[in-house]
Image: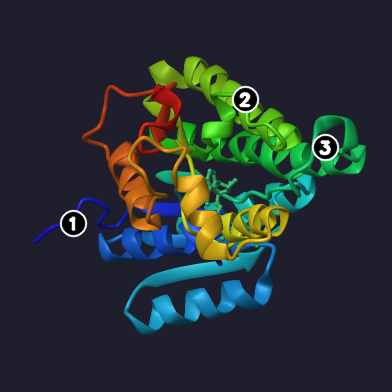
Amino acid sequence: MAERYDGKVVQITGAASGFGALAAQRFAHEGARLALSDVNAEALAETADNLRAAGAEVWEAPLDVSDASAVAAHLAEIGAQFGRLDVAINNAGVGHDMAPLHRLDEAEFDRMMAVNARGVFLGMKHQLPLMLANGGGAILNVASAAGLVGAGYLSAYAASKHAVVGLTRAAADEVARKGIRVNALCPSFASTPLFDEMADQVAARHGASRDEAYTRIAARVPMGRVARPEEVVQAMLWICDAENSFMTGQAISIDGGLTAV
Ligand code: NAI
C-alpha cells in the first residue's frame, strides 16, 4: 500500500531526542526520506543508525540551528543530496530554568532567542528557496502553548515561542500562493527529556518527586494529564500531509485544553 510520505524528503531538526526522534521514526514508517540534524552529534548518530537498521533512508549531520552559516551549508547539502525538500520540521528547541523575570539572566534570554526564534528564522530562510524551486512544500515550526499565552517563570522561553508563531504567520502569508504551507505546532506539557527538566524543577521547589511534579502540572490541564509524545507527533504527520491542503499560517494547539480555558 502506498504510504502518504512515500519518497518525500523530510527535514527534521532536533532529531536526536523527544518529539524530533519520534517524528523521524513515524515519517520513515510512512515512506519519507529523512534529513536529520541535532546539536548532539552522538545521540543523532544513534538515532540515525537505529532508523537505518529498520530500513529507513536517512542522511544526518550535526547542526546548531542558531549558526547562520552552518544552517545555510546544511540546507545546501540537503539540496545536493536529495535534489528537493518537501517537508521541514523546525523542532530543535531549548528551555531555561524556571525563574521570575526580574531574576532571569539576560544571557538566558539571548540563548532562548538564538536557538528557538533565530533557529526557526534561519531554517525557513534556507528551506523556502528549495521549496520554491519544487513548486510547493510544508513547513512546521514547533512553538509551544507558551507561544500563545503567558507562561509565568518561563518568560524568555515564552517570548521566543511567541516569536516562532509570528515568524510562522508572516512566512505563511508570503508563500501562500506558491504552494507552500507554513504552520506552527503548540504543544503543552509532554513527557520528553526537556519537560522532565522542568518537572524536576517543580519537584525541587515543592520538595516532591518527579512523579508528584507530573501530577501537580497535570492538574492544570483540563484533560488532567500531560501528553504522550505520540499525541504531538501524530499532529505533525497530519499538518504536513499534502491532503491537508488549505491549512496555513495557523498555530495548532495540542494541549489537552490548556489554552482553551
Ligand atoms: P528534547 O530536549 O527531548 O529535544 C530537543 C532536541 O533539540 C535535543 O535533541 C537537543 O539536542 C536539540 N537541540 C537543542 N539545541 C539545539 C540547537 N541549538 N541546534 C540543534 N539542535 C538543538 O525536547 P522536546 O520536548 O522533544 O522538544 C522539541 C520541541 O518541542 C522544542 O522546540 C520544545 O521547545 C518544544 N516543546 C516541548 C514541549 C514539551 O512539553 N516537551 C512543550 C512545548 C513545546
| Residue that numbered label 1 is attached to | 3
- What separation in Å lies between label 1 and label 3 (alpha carbons)? 42 Å
Q: Earlier in the sequence, mark 2 or mark 3?
A: 3
130 or 114: nearer the viewer: 114
Quadrant location, the N terminus: bottom left
- What separation in Å lies between label 1 and label 2 (alpha carbons)? 39 Å
The quadrant holding residue 223 is top left
Disc 1 Cβ-to-ligand 1 distance below 8 Å: no
Number of numbered discs on residues: 3
| Left or right of 232 on screen, residue 13 | right
Q: Position of residue 246 (x, y in %)?
A: 28, 22
224 or 95: nearer the viewer: 224
**Residue drawn 84% across the image and 38% down it:** 110
| Left or right of 166 on screen, residue 58 | left
Disc 1 crowd, CA 10 A, few/some/many (<14, 14-19, 20+): few
Inspect the image, locate mark 1, and give the three-letter code of the amino acid beneath it: Glu
Q: Earlier in the sequence, mark 1 or mark 2?
A: 1
| Residue that numbered label 3 is attached to | 109
Disc 3 Cβ-to-ligand 1 distance below 8 Å: no
Inspect the image, locate mark 3, and give the three-letter code of the amino acid beneath it: Phe
| Residue that numbered label 2 is attached to | 150
Disc 2 crowd, CA 10 A, few/some/many (<14, 14-19, 20+): some
Q: Position of residue 138 (x, y in %)?
A: 40, 36
